[in-house]
Image: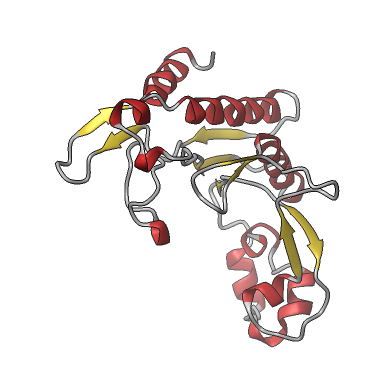
Amino acid sequence: ADPVFLGDYPAVMRKRVGDRLPTFTEDEREALLGAWDFFGLNHYTSKYIASSGESGGTSWADDCGTTSYTKDLDGNAIGADSDSSWLKVVPWGFRKSLNWVKDRYDNPPILVTENGVSVPGESDAALEDALADTFRVDFYSQYIGNMSLAIDEDGVDVQGYFAWSFMDNFEWTDGYNVRFGMHYVDYDTEERYAKDSSRWYKDVIANNGW
C-alpha cells in the first residue's frame, strides 16, 4: 500500500528486490499518491517473525527475508489450531495489525474486508454438530472484541467489518475440504442451514455490539 499512501515502495523493499520493482516517474508518483478511498484489510491470523538473512534468491520468501513461527521460544503455541494449517487463532494480533496500519499510514479509514475461521473437524462432523459452531462464535467474539479495543482505546479508524463467510464455499487451494461459513452448505443437495454463529452475529449487528 505504500505507493498510494506514501508515494513509493518501502526503502527496504527496494533494497531487497532491486530492479525487479518498477520505478515511478514524478507524474506517476503524483498520480499514485493519495489515490485511495480507504485501506482494505483481510485478516485471519498472526505469526512470530524473525530475520532469515540474505539468501540471494528471487522468490517471494527470499524477498521477504523472514521466517515465520507459530510457537514462541518456550515452545508455546501462538494460538489455537483451526481446521486450516495456516490459521491459528490470535485475536491480539488483529488489534496489533490495525494499529500498524494506523501508525504507518496516518490513521486512514479501514474496512476489514475479510475475517473468519475454519472450525476443526467441521467438514467431517455430523450436521447437528457442525451447526453448533461454538469455536467460530468464540473466534468472532475475540476478534471483534480486539477490533473494538483498537477503535475505542487506540483510536483506529475502522469504519466497516465483513465476516468471512456468509456460507461455506470453495476455499482456494483447500477447495471444499474446509468450511468458513456461518451457514452450512450440503454440497450434494445445495441445501443451506444456519449455524449458531449466524444467529450470534445477527444479534451483534442488531445491537451494534454485545
In the image as oriented, which residue stretches furthest toward the left? Answer: 189
Judging depth in this view, the residue of 9 and 119 nearest the camera is 119
- Residue 199 in the image: x percent, y percent? 37, 19
Please say if 29 is above or below 116.
below
For the point 67% across and 61% down, the residue is 2
- Identify the image quadrant of residue 182: top left
- Residue 73 in the image: x percent, y percent? 85, 50
Judging depth in this view, the residue of 163 and 151 nearest the camera is 163
Q: Which quadrant, please, contains the N terminus?
A: bottom right
- Residue 187 in the image: x percent, y percent? 22, 45
Q: How many marks?
A: 0
For the point 69% across and 25% down, the residue is 149
Please say if 96 is above or below 71.
above
- Identify the image quadrant of residue 20: bottom right
Judging depth in this view, the residue of 197 and 201 nearest the camera is 197
Please say if 65 is above or below 17.
above
Q: Taking 157 as reference, is 207 left or right?
A: left
Q: Taking 84 as reference, is 181 left or right?
A: left
Q: Taking 136 as reference, is 108 left or right?
A: right
Q: Taking 16 as reference, is 167 left or right?
A: left
Rendering colour mode: secondary structure
Please say if 102 is above or below 28.
above
For the point 22% across and 40% down, the residue is 186
- Residue 3 in the image: x percent, y percent? 65, 65
Q: Which quadrant, please, contains the C terminus?
A: top right
